[in-house]
Amino acid sequence: MVDRDLPQAMLLDLDDTILSYSAHAEPCWLSAFVGDNLEWEVAVPQKLGLYAVWHDPTGQGLPPDSTIQPDRTIYSLSELLNQNT
């Protein structure tokens, strides 16, 4: 049984067969997951210990009822090139 409260990392192939698994994955701060889907591209990567950047190209902000908090929000992908923000 997998403890869902622990950070976990899995490497899956295209058929969702588990190729490797670590129940004690350490957060990786040198990599970031960037996407515009809060559930799949922010919440899930954060649960795996990744830094998650939410791309909000429309500038509408987080939905008022969102429980998901990205580590960073960008409005243009070019913001990823500016290391001072």
Image (cartoon, helix red, strand yellow):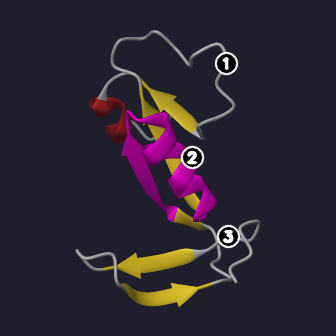
Residue on which the image places disc 1: 65
Q: How far from the left and from the top, in percent, is residue 44?
A: 53, 53
Residue 46: give its label.
Answer: none
Query: Which quadrant of the figure contains the N terminus?
Result: bottom right
* Amino acid at circle 3: Pro
Q: How far from the left and from the top, in percent, is residue 76?
A: 32, 24
Q: Nearer the viewer, residue 76 or 4?
A: 4
The local crowd at label 1, few if under 14, some if 14 to 19, many if 20 or more residues have their Cα within 10 Å, is few
Of the two numbered discs 3 and 1 on the same chain, state the one appearing first in sequence.
3
Residue 48 in the figure: left or right of residue 20 = right
* Amino acid at circle 2: Ala
Residue at point 44%, 90% (across, down) = 20
As measured in the structure, the alpha-carbon distance from the residue carrying label 3 to the one carrying label 2 is 12 Å
As measured in the structure, the alpha-carbon distance from the residue carrying label 2 to the one carrying label 1 is 15 Å
In this rendering, the answer to whether 52 lies above or below 29 is above
Residue on which the image places disc 3: 7
Numbered range of the magenta stretch = 30-49
Residue on which the image places disc 2: 43
Q: How far from the left and from the top, in percent, is residue 31?
A: 45, 62
The local crowd at label 3, few if under 14, some if 14 to 19, many if 20 or more residues have their Cα within 10 Å, is some
* Amino acid at circle 1: Asp
